[in-house]
Image: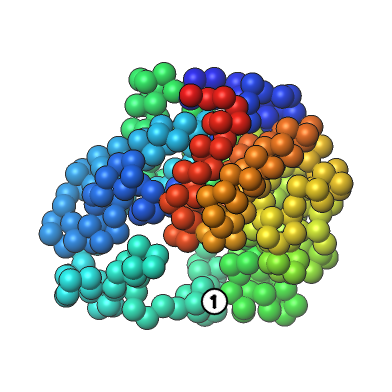
Amino acid sequence: MPGSRERVAKAFEHVAPDRTPLFEIFCQYHPIYWDVCGSNPATDARMHWDALAEGITWEELIALEARAAFEIHRHFGVDMVRLGGSSSPDLRRPVKTGPDTWELNGAEHFYNERTNLVEPSARLADSEKQAEEQVRAQIDQWDGSVGESSDAAFVVFERVKARAAAEGLDWVYMGEVGAGTGTAFWPPFMLMWLATDPGLLRVWVQMQKASAFARTRDLVARGCTVIAMGGDVGCDKGSFISPSHYREFVLPTIQEHVDLIHDLGALAVYTSDGNHWDIAEEFFFDSRADGYKEVDKAAGMTWPRLMAAGVSERVCIIGNMDARHTMCLGTVEEVRAETIECLQYGQQSPGGHILHLSHSVHEDVKVENYHALVVAYREYFGIG
């Protein structure tokens, strides 16, 4: 939307903009794309896998991805855009084995009608995807170097940015990069290292940090003026690791990352699901972050408590629509009521507010519910 940069800047500067900025992450292949862009290999997982099996070229796929990414954000009138990476030029070619099944690298995959995604028939838990011996070997072999980023990964981003500029849309672009501080994704053996081998864990964090900081510089250089960083550190019951371990192993990297982002002239947004009240001082204030994304209302990160704790006075809240219950299970009327309530709380927040789901438009979010949110938002601000 015209005026997006000023609108977002004011939200972060704790100055009331003309209206609350709108931001959203639209997960790839969500049916909401079909309403806006139609079904094609960039918007429909089943068609994507069929196209790969039939020989679609990388150039054809990239063109479709860029068009879908641009059209979905333009349609909903967002002010800030966060895009995923482009498909790799090294397209993996599955073999179609049935109406809704494929084989890739010897593994069976099927179309899941509930999620509208193509998924492996046998799925590993995140904690089982890495072996301790493999990670130890990576640490032993690390020489401090960082691989170069690939321009191919940014083709969709560059095309969307160019088309937006041509049409007079001054979108703000958010890059997203973690530096190994998302403790929710640490495998069990790494959590054990907190007690058994903290030195090894520190080296691993340095590895992640080196790569992440290089990517951060690249993202800002390409035009991302907001960087979402951090990563999930909490669940419904609190921090995944103890507050003392958080202060020792996570907070220093978060602070260093935020400082780098600020030195580059960008804004830093701490991104994490979960309940953060047992590490609130460190998470919200000591981190020096400008914004807080993935505000998990269902985990207790509610507007009243954020306001009572002084968080909303100092940190821009990027949320706080419930993407766990209301957007997935609620009615259109319930979504409308929560949208208005969220906007009203946000306008009372001196720290600024950007409307966003508590995570994203993920596979369980009802299409009609996200449409209802945007309709309520537009009516609230009198947008035609």
Task: Tell me if I can see residue 257 in this picture.
Answer: no
- Above or below residue 167? Residue 327 is below
What element does badge 1 sit on? helix
The residue positioned 63% from the left and 45% from the top of the image is 337
Where residue 348 sits in the image (x, y, percent)?
78, 34
Where residue 340 sits in the image (x, y, percent)?
65, 40
Q: Residue furthest left?
A: 54
- Above or below residue 174? Residue 61 is below
Scheme of colours in the image: rainbow
Q: Residue furthest front?
A: 333
Comparing 288 with 300, the one in front is 300
Where residue 263 sits in the image (x, y, percent)?
66, 32
Comparing 308 with 325, the one in front is 325
Mark 1, residues whose alpha carbon is within 10 Å: few (<14), some, or many (≥20)? some
> Can you tell which quarter of the image residue 350 is in?
top right
Relative to residue 173, is residue 233 drawn left or right?
right
Relative to residue 28, is residue 102 drawn left or right?
left
Q: Amino acid at mark 1?
A: Ser
The residue positioned 54% from the left and 70% from the top of the image is 140
The residue positioned 54% from the left and 61% from the top of the image is 329
Where residue 25 sits in the image (x, y, percent)?
49, 46
Q: Which residue is mark 1?
A: 127
Comparing 173 with 47, the one in front is 47
Total numbered labels: 1
Task: Tell me if I can see residue 193 in this picture.
Answer: yes
The residue positioned 41% from the left and 32% from the top of the image is 74
> Can you tell which quarter of the image residue 322 is in?
bottom right
- Above or below residue 248? Residue 36 is above
